[in-house]
Structure formats: structure tokens, C-alpha cells
């Protein structure tokens, strides 16, 4: 038996205000659906952050509906949970529920195990870090069910595991139910699989299907997992998707012309025009000269971003040596600035994504809710 594990599709993301980048996300999503159909998987799991915002545009909603419809037409069932990007803090019905109600896909995010084709499936929507203690009992309950079940047991979560990313980690692997044979994860955007002795199966992150704004511009691969559960052990196989190429270059101001030549040679002939970022280090630079050199790439790239970093700035900056995920560095700096991991988590992981999406009303609701919670804790 074979199933696809897809996560962090972020349908509706319009990166850098570019219609082409929005279409890129739809293209790789459809690649994942097409590949799953061609490989005759038995079912598909979507591990959260289906959409980029809780109130996605019509195109994003239709793209997801068409993907699920095509799976159904090929007798492939699918299951989903919700990530933080899917859940509105203003009390409204999440858009993905529509697919459940229309029987295009089955929602499994409330922690109630179901049996499907001899497999036990259980899932939880995104759990905020402050809510984790409330789920210890629920984890224990489904672990007892899994322990008694003889077939494969799959747990679907949209959480950061500390052993994978200490900044984005919300729970540790030891917090998880022990008796599942595969942990289908979402939330972290890099691909990684780890097996722990205290768990019966691997924890697997397929990562996002395309680079998102928070990840910056970098040369990387994106995709999803096809997981073989024909035998006792779950075996995830990486399936790469054809994403738009992205490159980040560093150069000295004096060597910019040579670097532009090298970049031109590298990107000429690519099937899709790439996204390019150039970090230029130097003193007394002339921006007119830089713009003239960058203009040589205009016909070869979709977008080209450049920035200047003087030695004084670069010695104390993260511009040139930034982490793989910008959010991690923002979170670390926020902890330093605010002196509180809890406050930094609220600002970076909850409030900032909503503000960045222009959801002012929802951001106000989040602030009010957090303030009421703060007052309640003060009284205790």
C-alpha cells in the first residue's frame, strides 16, 4: 500500500506581489496531485497549511477543489488537518471544511482515530505551544488505541519538533504518542526524516512544496513523500517537484561585473526564469553602476533583488550569513529584544503572519485575546 504525504502547500501565496509566483505554487501543487495519480497511491494526506491565509482567494479555493476532485475521479481518498495559516482567530468556519462537507476529502484534525483500509489514522490541527499541556491526555488516549491496533498507525500533526528545529520547536519527540508507525508532519518547511528509539516509526517532514517568503531566496529542492506501508515498516520516498529555480549570490562591489557574467552563464537556458538575489559588499559604492550591471540580467530572471552590505554593517548583521529560515533568526532576535520567549512567540509566530497578510481585523482579535489571557494569568 502506498500513500502521499503532502504538506504546507500555502495555496494563494502571492510572493513578492508576483502573479507568476502565485501560479508557481499552483503548478507544483498540481504536479504533486498528478504524480500521486500516476503512481496509483491509495490515499493522500495533507498535513496542514493548505492555504496561505484563512480567507484565501477564489483561485486558491478552486485549485484545491480541482485537485481533490481529480483524486476522487481516480478513486484516491484524501485526509487533511489544519495548520495555523488555515485557522482564523475570528470565529469563522475554516474554508477547508467545505471539502469535507462535500465529501471531496475527509477532515481528521480533532484527534479522533478512524480506521481506513486496515490502517489507523489520527490527526490534530495546529496546537499552540501554550495549549500543549492540554493535549497530554488526548495523546495518551490515542496511544492506547494505537497500541492495540495491529495494522499501520499514522499520526498527522502540524507542529515543530524541537529536535528538528530548536527555534520553531513547540514539542519534543518524547511528547508524542509512542505507538504510531508513521508521523506525518507539517509546519517546518525543510525536508527531513528522523527515527527515534522511543517511537515505533519515523517522524517525517516533507517541507513546503515551494519556497515561501519567510524562507528567503536560496537554491534548494522541494517536494513531498510517497510512503510505502506494504511491509511492517513505513518507508518514505522523496518525490522532487519542478519548482522555479532560486539562487543567492555574494560578491564584492569591485567584482560585480564578473559575477554578473557568471550568473548569466549559470541561468541561461533554464526552463523557468529564476529568482535571483545578489548580496554586494563594498565601501563607497555607486548605485547607478550597480543598477546598470543588474539590468544585464533583466531578460534572464523573473525577479532580481540586490542589497549593499558595508563591512561595518556585515560584521554585526545577518544579511550575508542568514539562517535557512529567516523566521528562526527573527524569533531569536525577538527573544533578545523582548526578554521573553513567550512574548517573542506571540509576536513572530502568531501576530506577524496575520499582519503580513493584511488581516487587520484578525490581528486586532489576536491582540485582544492575548491581552485578556494576560490579565487572567495576572489574577491567578
Image: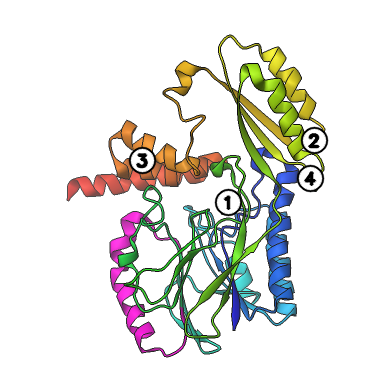
- Residue 285: quadrant of the picture: top right
* Label 2 secondary element: loop
Could you say where residue 10 lies in the image, as x and y percent from the top left?
Answer: 60, 54
Number of the label disc, if any, that sits on residue 300: 2
Q: CA distance from mark 4 to mark 2?
A: 9 Å
Residue carrying label 3? 344
- The residue pinned by badge 1 equals 53
Circle 3 or circle 2, nearest the eye: 2
Q: Is residue 317 left or right of residue 266?
A: left
Q: Which residue is mark 4?
A: 270
Lower position in the chain sequence, tag 3 or tag 1: 1
Mark 3 residue element: helix
Residue at (57, 16) in percent of width and height: 282
Segment colored magenta: 125-153
Instruction: Name the quadrant containing residue 342.
Output: top left
Main SS of the magenta part reads: helix
**3D distance between C-alphas at marks 4 and 1:** 31 Å
- Mark earlier in primary sequence (4, 1): 1
The label nearer to you, 4 versus 1, is 4
Amino acid at each position: 500500500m502506498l500513500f502521499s504525504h503532502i504538506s504546507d502547500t500555502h495555496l494563494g501565496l502571492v510572493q513578492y506581489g508576483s502573479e507568476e509566483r502565485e501560479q508557481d505554487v499552483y503548478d507544483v501543487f498540481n504536479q504533486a496531485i498528478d504524480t500521486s495519480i500516476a503512481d496509483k497511491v491509495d490515499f493522500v494526506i495533507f498535513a496542514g497549511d493548505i492555504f496561505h491565509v484563512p480567507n484565501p482567494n477564489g483561485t486558491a479555493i478552486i485549485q484545491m477543489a480541482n485537485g481533490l476532485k481529480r483524486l476522487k475521479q481516480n478513486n484516491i481518498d484524501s485526509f487533511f488537518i489544519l495548520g495555523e495559516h488555515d485557522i482564523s482567530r475570528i470565529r469563522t468556519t475554516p474554508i477547508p471544511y467545505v471539502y469535507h462537507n462535500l465529501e471531496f476529502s475527509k477532515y481528521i484534525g480533532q484527534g479522533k482515530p478512524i480506521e481506513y483500509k486496515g490502517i489507523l489514522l489520527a490527526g490534530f490541527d495546529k496546537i499552540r505551544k501554550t495549549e500543549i499541556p492540554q493535549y497530554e491526555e488526548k495523546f495518551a488516549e490515542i496511544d492506547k488505541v494505537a497500541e492495540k491496533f495491529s495494522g499501520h498507525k499514522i499520526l498527522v500533526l502540524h507542529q515543530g519538533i524541537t529536535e528538528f528545529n530548536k527555534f520553531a520547536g513547540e514539542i519534543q519527540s518524547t511528547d508524542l504518542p509512542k505507538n504510531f508507525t508513521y508521523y506525518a508532519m507539517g509546519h517546518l518547511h525543510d525536508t527531513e526524516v528522523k527515527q527515534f528509539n522511543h517511537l515505533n516509526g519515523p517522524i517525517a517532514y516533507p517541507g513546503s512544496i515551494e519556497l515561501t517568503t519567510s524562507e528567503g531566496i536560496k537554491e534548494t529542492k522541494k517536494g513531498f513523500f510517497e510512503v510505502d506501508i506494504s511491509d511492517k515498516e513505513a518507508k518514505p520516498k522523496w518525490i522532487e517537484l519542478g519548482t522555479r529555480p532560486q539562487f543567492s549570490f555574494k560578491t564584492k562591489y569591485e567584482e560585480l561585473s564578473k559575477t554578473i557574467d557568471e550568473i548569466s552563464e549559470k541561468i541561461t537556458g533554464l526552463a523557468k526564469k529564476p529568482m535571483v538575489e545578489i548580496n554586494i559588499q563594498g565601501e563607497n559604492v555607486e548605485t547607478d553602476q550597480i543598477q546598470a550591471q543588474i539590468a544585464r540580467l533583466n531578460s534572464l530572471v523573473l525577479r532580481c533583488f540586490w542589497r549593499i552590505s558595508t563591512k561595518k554593517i556585515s560584521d554585526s548583521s545577518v544579511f550575508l550569513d542568514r539562517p535557512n529560515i529567516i523566521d528562526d533568526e527573527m524569533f531569536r532576535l525577538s527573544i533578545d529584544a523582548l526578554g521573553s520567549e513567550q512574548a517573542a512567540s506571540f509576536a513572530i509566530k502568531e501576530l506577524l503572519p496575520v499582519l503580513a497578510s493584511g488581516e487587520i481585523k484578525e490581528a486586532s482579535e489576536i491582540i485582544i485575546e492575548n491581552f485578556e489571557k494576560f490579565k487572567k494569568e495576572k489574577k491567578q
